[in-house]
Image (spheres, grey):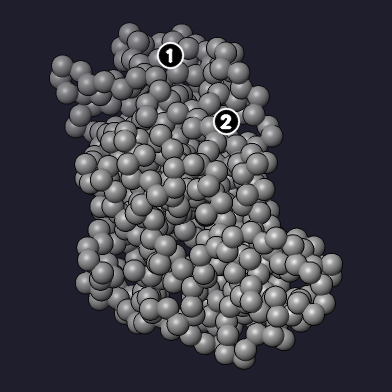
Amino acid sequence: MPLETPRRIVGELASRGYNAEREAVTLLSRASDPAAALERALEAVPEDALKLSADHVRTALDSREPASDPSPPSRSAPSRSAPSPSDSTVSSDSTVPSDPSPPSDSSGPSSPSDSVAPATPSVSGGESPLDSDGVDVSPVETRGSARRPRTPQSAVIAGDVTGRSTGTGEYGDFVKVFRDRYERLSRKLTGRVNHRPTTAVSNMPGGEETALIGMINDVRSTASGHWLVELEDTNGVFPCLVLKDKPIADLVEELLLDEVIAVEGTLSGDGGVLFVDSLHFPDVPRTHRPNTADRHVQAALVSDVHVGSQEFLAEEWSRFAAWLHTEEAEAVEYLLLAGDMVEGVGVYPNQDEELSIVDIYEQYEAFSEYLKEVPGDVEIVMIPGNHDAVRLAEPQPAFDEELREIMSAHDARITGNPSTVTVEGVNVLMYHGVSLDEVIAELPEHKASYDEPHLAMYQLLKKRHVAPQYGGHTRLAPEERDYLVVDDVPDIFHTGHVHKLGYGKYHNVLAINSGCWQAQTDFQRSVNIDPDHAYAPIVDLDTLKLTIRDFN
């Protein structure tokens, strides 16, 4: 294939099992015939070498053509004989410990046959968090035959706001986005209840049975300990009372403002209040059957790399990248990055004291160099996060052209946050996960916590919206369309942000929060965040079986 760009040279070298110094790639790209120069350079590489150096290229080019001024060499790529990480394979015959269950109207973590274990505890020291659970942990050998070159299918992107953002922040934009949210989520509930608009319910006589679908306008407790929930539709607001001794009273503690629910019940004698007998969420159908690939192929799901931080785990990342070059990782054809490629600048107080790279563009240049360590035939898809140089308000458009040019290695697919990425027929909802902070803060610990972030992810699936509450810590941008609604049920839900490893299944949707590649910072220590770092969840797309690779 033509090799007129450094990116393609890197990909061609990776397909042949070689890493390369940046200077070597630069020299090859500036040759009059890059393809021929590459062939001559590879002939100059000793048989036992795994990295193409600038000296190898110069040896091949000196007798043929003068070289242009090279760029400074980058940090060397990892050796394939790097220290061996360990892996934990969670399979259908693994014993699954008990896990807090969601309320009665929704299923909790699935049975052992779902081929996934509940979230691991916090990581301490260098041990795998899975060891104490009795799951087999065996070493990963990073030395061996190079992976065979192949061409993965191109990922298909949906639900991306990039290039479609129209919001100006005016009042009318907020009306549009909330109306769109209501209409789309209410359609998921109309088959479950025979609802009436609030205006019609207000005109009904007392004692009648009826149903409402509405957006939660307010939730408060009464003097008697009951719960008053105000529901708003496009016609008005109506009060609904959930009695404290009803079984559904436990569901009230899950409710967030601005989410859409349905209720059924009986009107009070004067018709001014609806006494609620049942409450429904848009939810993922229990009958959901996930799509799977028609061949054995794997995807690595990672997030929160945080290049530019003093605590970025460069050696652990290089061990991961080196493992991807081995025969054992031959089936890994996709790398899905769920945000926070870099540490950013000014994200939290005194962050500059914890930076190893203070310029945001230099952070992305360094990240691009680390990305080049990944085999060139792995298709990469990435979305931004709250540390990245994009707007903070969600939905977040993808990186701009200047940053795309910097991160051009491997022709990575760059899309917005959130986006649904379809690989090999499997739908992966990628969302960085800022709203997880809000869900964890608002809900009881047994329903959402940092130690078990997948439980908070279950709540977002249940609500069919990745950031349901407006006006809190999560910044939301008004658009004509609500890009945060989960229209179609994903097969995999992938988030990051909270720097904790968690995974499980909710109504057959595999939920994964993939941890991070950053050790604990002083700021994290001050807010009691103990990160789970250097783990790479690997999913078999043909079975949705999950394996956790430990590169600590």
Q: Amino acid at mark 2?
A: Asp
**Residue 137: x percent and y percent?**
32, 79
Q: Mark 1 Cα within 10 Å, few/some/many (few <14, many 20+)?
A: some
Q: Residue at horizontal 36%, vertical 11%?
A: 271
**Residue 268: x percent and y percent?**
31, 15
Total numbered labels placed on residues in the image: 2
Q: Mark 2 Cα within 10 Å, few/some/many (few <14, many 20+)?
A: many
Q: Nearer the viewer, mark 1 or mark 2?
A: 2
Q: Which residue is mark 1?
A: 237
The numbered dot on residue 290 is none
**Residue 19: x percent and y percent?**
59, 74
Closer to the chain start, of discs 1 and 2, is 1
Q: Residue furthest bottom?
A: 47
SS of the residue under disc 1: strand
Question: Does 391 sit above or below residue 109?
Answer: above
The numbered dot on residue 482 is 2
Q: Quadrant of residue 375?
A: bottom right
SS of the residue under disc 2: loop
Separation (CA) of disc 1 from disc 2: 21 Å
Question: Does 81 sit above or below residue 541?
Answer: below
Instruction: Please say whether residue 227 is visible from this viewpoint.
Output: yes
Q: Residue at horizontal 35%, vertical 39%?
A: 351
Q: Residue furthest left?
A: 224
Q: Residue at horizontal 40%, vertical 67%?
A: 315
Instruction: Please say whether residue 206 is visible from this viewpoint.
Output: no
